[in-house]
Amino acid sequence: MTGQWFLLLLLLFGFLVGGLHASAGDADPIYRTCVEQCEKTGNVGDISIPHCLFSSNDEAVNNTWYMQEPLYLQWKQLNCRSDCSYHCMIQRESEREGLGLSPVKYHGKWPFKRIYVFQEPASAALSALNLMTHFIGWLSFFVLVNYKLPLRPHSKRTYYEYTGLWHIYGLLSMNAWLWSTIFHTRDFEMTEKLDYSSAVALLGYSLILSLLRTFEVKDEATRVMFAAPILAFVTTHILFLNFYELDYGWNMKVCIVMGMIQLLVWAIWAGIKRHPHRFKLWTVVFGGAIAMLLEIYDFSPYSGYVDAHAMWHATTIPLTYLWWNFIKSDAEYRTAMLVKKAK
């Protein structure tokens, strides 16, 4: 019966998925011709592409050992095809701008201007700042619960019942933002899958954590019961993305649904329980909901660098700081209550 309900849930989510369409940019005959010519000649206008001395699989055309593509270039996935696509895209967008036309997407992505190897420099830098903010927040939480708050006299464990859960949350958050930084630096299949998978894993775990904290689930067996259906769905979704189809639209819908559910859970719980630090939580909830609109309302990058996704990364930095502040306040609040009961 559980398997039938899980299958039904997958089918219901499936109805949300729209059809896939090729991006307008890479369907443009002028762009496609430019890429084909570039791969043959190694030139886009006045720009010469040195990687086109090598074949598309990064082996030298004449197959001699001393003409092999350097390893650091192979790691960055800079090759003839990627560079031709990039320079043809920039050239075509310049032509479109001269005709008064708005930017279009190429292969599902907006036309970003690179800085060295950074494909989306603003999003990469802001992802790194989010990573740093989560690290500082998690570290300060670790110091608080282990060294500043009292410990249980016999076991020397923390009074706060959710300490371990928040440690896992911190590690998953840092992992997700690490791969976000790498993905926005160099976008190819492996980094894209790792970025999406890490984000989905974080959102799924965050949803589980929100339910465990708001329903005050402390028993390990009950926690497993709460977590099992969500873990099964998240695992299936990650496997779908990695081994069946990397569907950006479907993944976005799944992430938005999981995000909205946990925001509602936290907001309602804070009001019902009259948590003393509920205003911090409500600020994060409403700020997160507004920030999520930037993910839904997708606009082209300003000056080729800052798009809606980069703006979303910027808004999450102060929200992350406030979120960890609430987590620490919650730990102090619960610890004070339990210490008082123990006396």
Image (cartoon, helix red, strand yellow):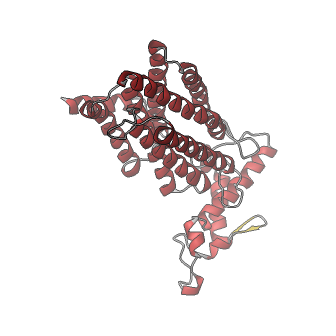
Give the vertical position of 181 relative to 300 (above or below): below
The spot of residue 144 in percent (x, y) is 51, 38
Q: Quadrant of residue 12?
A: top left
Relative placement, left or right, of 214 versus 100 is left
Q: Quadrant of residue 157?
A: top left
Relative placement, left or right, of 45 versus 307 is right
The spot of residue 118 in percent (x, y) is 66, 56
Give the vertical position of 223 relative to 306 (above or below): above
The spot of residue 65 in percent (x, y) is 54, 86
Q: Residue at image x 77%, y 64%?
A: 45
Give the vertical position of 102 relative to 266 (above or below): below
Position of the N terminus by quadrant: top left
The spot of residue 328 in percent (x, y) is 52, 32
Residue nearest the viewer, comparing 114 with 101: 114
Give the vertical position of 209 relative to 69 (above or below): above
Q: Residue at image x 37%, y 23%?
A: 343
Please count the marks in the image: 0
Residue that lies at the very extreme toward the left in this rendered image: 1
- Residue 296 seen in this snapshot: no
Residue nearest the viewer, comparing 60 with 263: 263
Residue nearest the viewer, comparing 183 with 263: 263
